[in-house]
Image: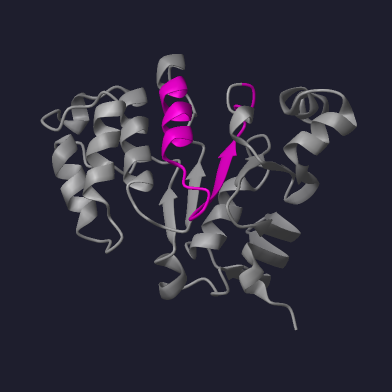
Amino acid sequence: MMNYADQAVFVEGLRKRYPGAEALRGINLQLERGQIWGLLGPNGSGKSTFLKCLVGLAQPDGGLIKIYNQEPGRQARKLIAFMPELDHLYRWMTVQGTLDFTAGFYQDWQAGRAEELLDFMRLKGEQKVGALSRGMRARLKLILALARKAPLILLDEPFSGIDPSSRERIVEGIIRQFKSEEQTMIISTHAVGSTEQLFDGVIFLDQGEVYLQGNAEDLRTEHGQSINDIFKEVFV
């Protein structure tokens, strides 16, 4: 019998349909613990749907999902820190108020790490969320995910539409805060060039199917080019 606990994420035959479209077409994946995975593909490839299925925000139409040996649901959600692509922040709150509000929902919230990230991301607690730029709000959303001691961190398009300085700050923040001995991370993105340094492994999704998957360094050696160049060759 398969020991799903050997993987952070085990997915077999995952399917998800929406009216008029099949978003996921039988995804099979086994992601080892302690690594950062890039979930790469153009808009509409199924990346966000895949992450929502892992979190339990979307109900699959078929297949099996195990998160650290747990099926999606209340117990599995305790293991996941999820940063959605949509801006879910309350604009009338302050930055510190947002942190305090979020902390109340999670027993694994680490106030010290949140304060450290706040300083690193160059945000001030008294700032109103509504006055922050898009890049600054993206930094705040990342803090909300990284301040938890969750075994699995899911970041959905954390670099979408933000300025280069914020993108660099977010990449560096992930590098500084990721605890490989305790955590696994999946980053959904189509901004591959500035982020591939993060990835231990990559998954290319195309129209709801896994087009390519593997260790990032092995793929660079096999193809003789960067992950970004492979991405361009496949999707551009």
**Residue drawn at the location 48% of the way across and 56% of the way down:** 182
Say how the picture is coloured.
one colour
The quadrant in which the C terminus is found is: top right
**Residue drawn at the location 68% of the way across and 77% of the way down:** 3
> Most extreme residue toward the left, as rendered?
126
Q: Nearer the viewer, residue 95 or 185?
A: 185
Q: Nearer the viewer, residue 210 or 100?
A: 100
Q: Is residue 31 above or below residue 112?
A: below
- Residue 211 location, quadrant: top right
Q: Where residue 101 appears, x then y in whole percent?
A: 18, 51
Q: Is residue 1 above or below residue 59?
A: below
**Residue drawn at the location 15% of the way across and 39% of the way down:** 96
- Asked whether, in this view, residue 73 is left or right of residue 125, the answer is right
Q: Is residue 93 visible?
A: no
Q: Is residue 124 above or below residue 149?
A: above
Q: How many marks do you count on the picture? A: 0
The residue segment tinted magenta is: 167-193
The quadrant in which the N terminus is found is: bottom right
- Asked whether, in this view, residue 66 is left or right of residue 169, the answer is right
Q: Where residue 44 appears, x then y in whole percent?
A: 64, 41
Q: Is residue 172 visible?
A: yes
- Residue 133 location, quadrant: top left
> Most extreme residue toward the bottom, as rendered?
1
**Residue drawn at the location 49% of the way across and 44% of the way down:** 155
Q: Is residue 20 magenta?
A: no
> Most extreme residue toward the top, as rendered?
164
- Asked whether, in this view, residue 49 is left or right of residue 76, the answer is right
Q: Is residue 176 above or below residue 184?
A: above
Q: Where residue 71 appears, x then y in whole percent?
A: 55, 75
Q: Nearer the viewer, residue 113 or 71?
A: 113
Q: Where residue 135 appears, x then y in whole percent?
A: 36, 24
- Asked whether, in this view, residue 208 is left or right of residue 87, the answer is right
